[in-house]
Image: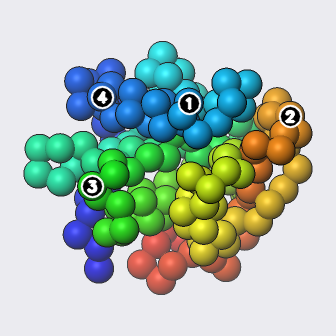
Amino acid sequence: MSRWVVEQHDPGSPAAVALVERHLAFARASSPPEDVHALEVAGLVDRDVTFFGIRDGDALVCMGALQHLDEGHGEIKSMHTEEGARGRGAGRAMLDHLLSVARARGYRRVSLETGTMAAFAPARALYAAAGFAVCEPFAGYGRSANSVCMTLELDGSDVPPSGPRR
């Protein structure tokens, strides 16, 4: 059982803004400008985006967001774990939570875009371990050697025993 508690969080809070800025700095240092698709705070407060955070004590150590694309399709955005919290299961707890919310909303598919560079290898491994597969670009993303799109079909068979039922 994970010790991490995922809660809906205000992306405009000082702790969230600081983590978003670290996420953007990571993305900008790892990707060419045209392939940085991470949302800034203004994008995370959009009505179609729900932002979540994980705290370790008073520190916000992980964030993730779920963006509504259409009635059956959501996109995972802005997944980031603070460097000091990596390897402790916070990212997986966030991903599991986002997928649970997607199922509760009735999405049939959840997709994401991430980088192809070595810095993004842990993220790609996390998504692959959760069942995501490489897919064609979606929702306006274009083809790029620096970017990969992944998707997970939510047919109900992947719902964990303790997860919500559709």
Q: Secondary structure at mark 4?
A: helix
- The residue identified by callout 2 is 142
Q: Position of residue 63 (x, y in %)?
A: 39, 44
Q: Secondary structure at mark 2?
A: loop
Of labels 2 and 1, earlier in sequence is 1
**Relative to 61, residue 20 above or below:** above
Q: Secondary structure at mark 1?
A: helix
Q: Nearer the viewer, mark 4 or mark 1?
A: 1
- The residue identified by callout 1 is 28
Residue at the spot x=74%, y=56% of the render? 150
The amino acid type of the residue labelled 4 equals Ala
Alpha carbon separation for disc pair 2 and 1: 18 Å
Of labels 1 and 3, earlier in sequence is 1
Q: Position of residue 42 (x, y in %)?
A: 48, 16
Q: Position of residue 30 (x, y in %)?
A: 58, 39
Of labels 2 and 4, earlier in sequence is 4
Q: How many residues crowd around disc 3 within 10 Å: few (fewer than 14), some, or many (20 or more)?
A: few
Q: How many residues crowd around disc 4 within 10 Å: few (fewer than 14), some, or many (20 or more)?
A: some
**Relative to 88, residue 37 above or below:** above
Residue at the spot x=56%, y=30% of the render? 28
Alpha carbon separation for disc pair 1 and 3: 20 Å
Q: Residue furthest left?
A: 57
Residue 84 numbered tag: 3
